[in-house]
Amino acid sequence: MLRLSLFFVAGFLAVPFFHQPVLGVLHALAVVPFAPFNLTPTAPLGVPSLLSASFWGGVWAVVMLLVLRWDAHKPQPWIKALLFGGIALTTVALLVVFPLKGMGVDPAQLPGRFLIGFLLNATWGVGTLILARTLLPR
């Protein structure tokens, strides 16, 4: 249980320390129109957007731990974490989360949105492993 909790914390912290800085770079380059570290309340609970994203980062970190069967005593699965974050999280965001938020799925925008999501979520995946390795006892 401690292991799952620490992995949740790693995924939670990977959002503000890895995902959001990359979003900031993409925003500064005018690739995305929205700035990082958004504190706008989200529906239905009114939780700040950054906190909501961090919570889901923690949940996805536990899923990633279970899927990858990550072990602190074995070599790190960096490529698997990068691909898990980049592909799994981006696919869920584009096909489930965006439609639920009324954003829809425009096939013409799908490749660009997938690439942006891949960059953000792959960074989260690798960041989660870095933080998990730091937090988990040897």
Image (tube, rainbow, N blue to C red):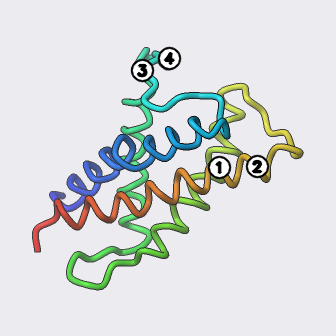
Q: For residue 44, which numbered disc appears in the image?
A: 4
Residue at figure coordinates x 78%, y 33% from the top left: 104
Tell me which numbered mark, 1 or 4, is placed earlier along the sequence: 4
Amino acid residing under circle 3: Leu
Give amino acid for label 4: Pro
Separation of disc 1 and disc 2 at Cα?
Answer: 6 Å
How would you rate the neighbour count of disc 1 (Cα within 10 Å): few for under 14, some for 14-19, many for 20 or more? some
Q: Regarding mark 3 in the picture, which secondary structure is present there?
A: loop
- Quadrant of the image occupied by residue 98: top right
- Sequence order check: which comes first, mark 3 or mark 4? 3
**Mark 1–mark 2 contact, CB under 8 Å?**
yes
Q: CA distance from mark 2 to mark 3?
A: 25 Å
Q: Which residue position holds label 3?
A: 39
* Amino acid at dot 1: Ile
Is the residue 45 above or below the residue 61 in the image?
above
Separation of residues labelled 1 and 3 (CA atoms): 21 Å
